[in-house]
Image (cartoon, helix red, strand yellow):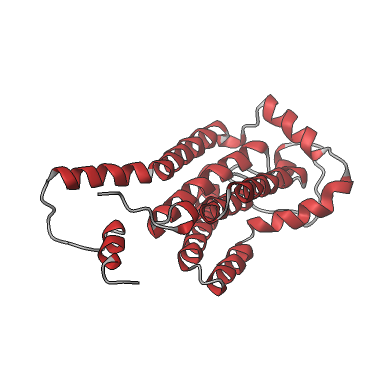
Amino acid sequence: MGDSRIPVLAGGLGLLDSSPMVRTPGTTRARTNATELHRTELLLLVSGIVVLGVTALSVRDGYVSGAERSVFEWINGLPDGIYTPLAVIMQLGNLAAVLVLTVVALALRRYRLAIGIGLAGSAAYFISKVVKEMVDRGRPAVLLDDVEQRGAHASGLGYVSGHSAVAFAVVTVAALWLAPKARTVLWILAATVAFSRIYVGAHLPMDVVGGAALGAACGAVGRLLVGARRHGHQRVPEP
């Protein structure tokens, strides 16, 4: 990389000039452009926090609405034949998947992608544990009758879904490095993880909605921290 490009990239990442900034039309415009560059991340972060808060309040004290019960019973009652493919996709929501994907990104020399996935995925996993204790809502088998539990029976608390949180956190970050069609596939996979957690009887619908919101918020923070935009390249405001 030529010396002439280093100041531009470093400036775009906020690494230059730690002294107080003098207000000029140019610096004001740069700040405005920087905000516009991260508008998606800020929207994801705020929306995720709001949805997480609303769903948490709606399920406190173990409350299950009639609509939520109906959706759960429909998904949980689907045929057993779809279990195997869903069980495979569901692993995207494991903490182990975060480690594997981080290592793969490092092997491909996508360092910002690796950092973003590692930070966002880990944060989603551990924060979900904290939220579970705060909200204290049980699993479907505790709150409802006739729950079909498939695979290893989940224990502990239900809200939020850690699998959903991790999957959406990883996908929110990874989507920056992919073309539109590949991004669509990733979002479908994340939604399938959430769907599968209801299907196997591990979570109620609001659990996975809250988990997805938490994951999107963690992913947005990860994107902000690594400073990456479209396809992993930093977009520096034009002069």
* Residue at the extreme top: 66
Q: In the image, 128: left or right of 74? A: left
Residue in the image at 77% along x and 37% along y = 75
**Residue 33, quarter of the rendered image:** top left
| Quarter residue 104 falls in | bottom right
The residue lying furthest to the bottom in this view is: 107
| 141 on left or right of 162 | right
At a point 83% along the width and 50% down the height, the residue shown is 83
Q: Position of residue 157 (x, y in %)?
A: 62, 49
Viewer-nearest residue: 4 or 173: 4
Decide if residue 215 is on the left or right side of residue 153: left
How many discs mark residues in the rendered view?
A: 0
Residue depicted at 42% across the width and 45% down the height: 41
- Give left or right: position of 78 versus 61: right
Which image quadrant for residue 55?
top right
Quadrant (top left/top right/bottom left/bottom right) for the N terminus: bottom left
Q: Nearer the viewer, residue 147 or 165?
A: 165
Residue 173, percent across and down? 51, 54
Question: x, y (%) of residue 131?
Answer: 51, 48
Expressed as whole percent of the image width and height from the top left, the position of residue 235 reads 37, 53
Query: Residue at left 46%, top 37%?
Result: 47
